[in-house]
Image (tube, rainbow, N blue to C red):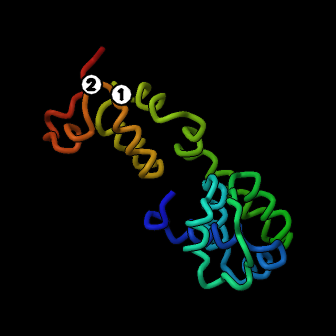
Amino acid sequence: MEYESLTGPEKVAIVILSMSQDMVRNFLSQLSDEEVQKALAAVSRLDEIPPRVQDMVLKEFEESLGRRDFAIAGGRKQALAIVENALEPERAPSILEHLGRDEMRIDWTLRAYQPQFIADRIGNEHPQTIALILAQIPADRGAKVIAALPGRSSRMWCCASPASRRWPTR
């Protein structure tokens, strides 16, 4: 994970993951439901955040966070725990409903699989189908899938004309 590739909601998620539950409760109470949903969806999609990236995101909070010689981790369990422990009971059901929808995203479904496995499964699909799938997963992971696609190099795929972007059949 690189700092430069983080989205706004991902940066908010890192801040949330770095706070105590009391701080999270106070922070989330100042956000709209839509902002909370976006932030917690990002929390649930994050894996381990390296300390270097956390430090860059949290520079302005450094004094209140203290020393961080450990990685923090997101995930669905963490997002659910935040909802349970930090949100007011009347807001929690709506947020949980939206987290449930987020679970159905392609990136959640493919999270457990290695890029080579994904490439092997989608390699014979139409290029537009491949593009749709790759658009739903993080860019660094999508690049690894493209590199692993059978029968074409990523350079050929990126530079080929649309008419020539047909994957060979096996």
Q: Position of residue 144 (x, y in %)?
A: 40, 41
Residue at the spot 75% in from the left edge and 73% down from the top edge: 19
Determine the image quadrant of residue 92: bottom right
Q: Secondary structure at mark 2?
A: loop
Q: Name which residue type carries label 2.
A: Gly
Asked if 170 appears above or below 161 in the picture, the reply is above
The residue that disc 1 covers is 123
Q: Position of residue 161 (x, y in %)?
A: 13, 41
Of residue 36 and residue 71, the one placed in the foreground of this image is 71
Which mark identifies residue 69?
none
The Cα atoms of the two marked residues, 1 and 2, are separated by 8 Å
Circle 2 packing at 10 Å, graded few (<14), some (14-19), many (20+), is few
Asked if 150 appears above or below 94 in the picture, the reply is above
Q: Position of residue 132 (x, y in %)?
A: 38, 44
Q: Position of residue 143 (x, y in %)?
A: 38, 45
Q: Are marks 1 and 2 in contact (CB under 8 Å)?
A: yes
Residue at the spot 66% in from the left edge and 78% down from the top edge: 32
Total numbered labels placed on residues in the image: 2
Q: Name which residue type carries label 1.
A: Gly
Horizontal relation, residue 97 to residue 126: left or right: right
Of residue 18 and residue 162, the one placed in the foreground of this image is 18
Residue at the spot 59% in from the left edge and 80% down from the top edge: 59
The residue that disc 2 covers is 151
* Quadrant where the C terminus is found in the figure: top left
Q: Secondary structure at mark 1?
A: loop
